[in-house]
Amino acid sequence: MDAGREEGLPTPEVWSSFVRRLEERYGLCEVPRSSLLGSCRPDFLSHALQKRVAFLLPSAVLGELATTHPIVSIASDGESPAVAVPGAVIAAYVGRSLQGPSGGVHGGAIASILDASIGMATNPRSDPDGYVTAQLVVNYRRIVPLGSYVVAIAYVHDREPARRKCYGMSRLVDAGALARTPSIGFSRKPLEAARRDATRERLYADATALFVRQRARRSVGDAEASSQVLAHATQKIRTVRVWNWPAAL
Ligand SMILES: CCCCCCCCCCCC(=O)SCCNC(=O)CCNC(=O)[C@H](O)C(C)(C)COP(=O)(O)OP(=O)(O)OC[C@H]1O[C@@H](n2cnc3c(N)ncnc32)[C@H](O)[C@@H]1OP(=O)(O)O
């Protein structure tokens, strides 16, 4: 028996049909991991979740390319290195390999999904000098049963570009319960209000995070890695204005 079947993972077909339903229902578009992370970066979540994970952005922000090439066309420049998106979504199947001591899904796995979703809302594309997590506070509301389909809905609620700071929130909900709601709601409502929706959405956990933009990197190794990422991304992405790579190397 292969590892996937032993784990009870959804087949790739079942998984893609789940993702397509999310896209259609909520006006989202799956973003290829290569354009988020670059080919030379390890994709931790994909490994941990055995590829049953999808990174989604609202189709509206993807512009015309979304219809023919579902690839991020969001650009940044030296003046405004972070581009605001209304929000970001990570959908995942959390299987038995993620079991924690509670018998449900391990809290570290839940934190990773929440963190990555806020990271994606903060950095809608890979950026070597982008925002990294400085602080993550997770509230665990319910045990997540093994074998669940979950959705993390993240958005940025405050930015202080001059201080390189960006504050975001995310809530991890059950995908089945979410399907009963007509819209995904990247509303900037305070977390307390989001919590009031907890019953309707079947809220498993929520998080607040502070992301801080890194200072420009200067090492030659990083520059080489960055140019590989860029080369790969520009092959994949039709329309892209690139971040100004550190000039002083
Ligand atoms: C997977 C697919 C996904 C796809 C999408 C991709 C998204 C990726 C998301 C994953 C994100 C990660 O997991 S990242 C990996 C985990 N994180 C890290 O490894 C970060 C390690 N830490 C660092 O690199 C550094 O500490 C930084 C960059 C966070 C900050 O260092 P720094 O640059 O020297 O900052 P500094 O000048 O001191 O501070 C700038 C301002 O931020 C505040 N500040 C700095 N750190 C903190 C802090 N921990 N808590 C509170 N406040 C802080 C300061 O008070 C100051 O505010 P003021 O005085 O100006 O008001």
Image (cartoon, rainbow, N blue to C red):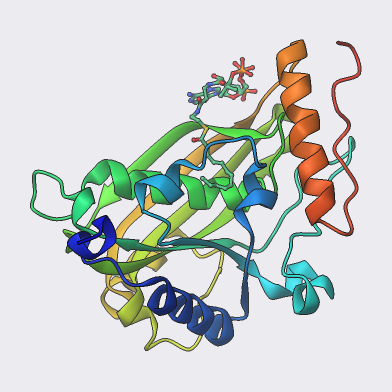
Classify residue 144 by image quadrant: bottom left
Q: Is residue 157 visible?
A: no
- On the rendered structure, is 189 left or right of 215? left
> In the rendered view, would you say 198 is above or below 160?
below
Residue 9, horizontal then vertical, whole percent? 28, 66
> In the rendered view, would you say 19 is above or below 90?
below
Q: Residue at x 53, y 37 (%)?
A: 42
Front position in the image: 85 or 146: 146
> In the rendered view, would you say 212 is above or below 216?
below
Residue 147, horizontal then vertical, whole percent? 22, 66
Which corner quadrant holds the N terminus?
Answer: bottom left
Which corner quadrant holds the C terminus?
Answer: top right
- On the rendered structure, is 46 left or right of 2? right
Residue lying farthest to the front in this orientation: 1
Q: Is residue 156 visible?
A: yes
Q: Residue at x 14, y 55 (%)?
A: 104
Q: Residue at x 8, y 49 (%)?
A: 102
- On the rendered structure, is 235 left or right of 121? right
Image quarter for ligand 1 equals top right
- On the rendered structure, is 213 left or right of 169? right
Residue 75, horizontal then vertical, whole percent? 84, 51
Front position in the image: 77 or 13: 13
Classify residue 248 by image quadrant: top right
Residue 58, horizontal then vertical, whole percent? 65, 71
Number of numbered discs visible in the structure rendering: 0
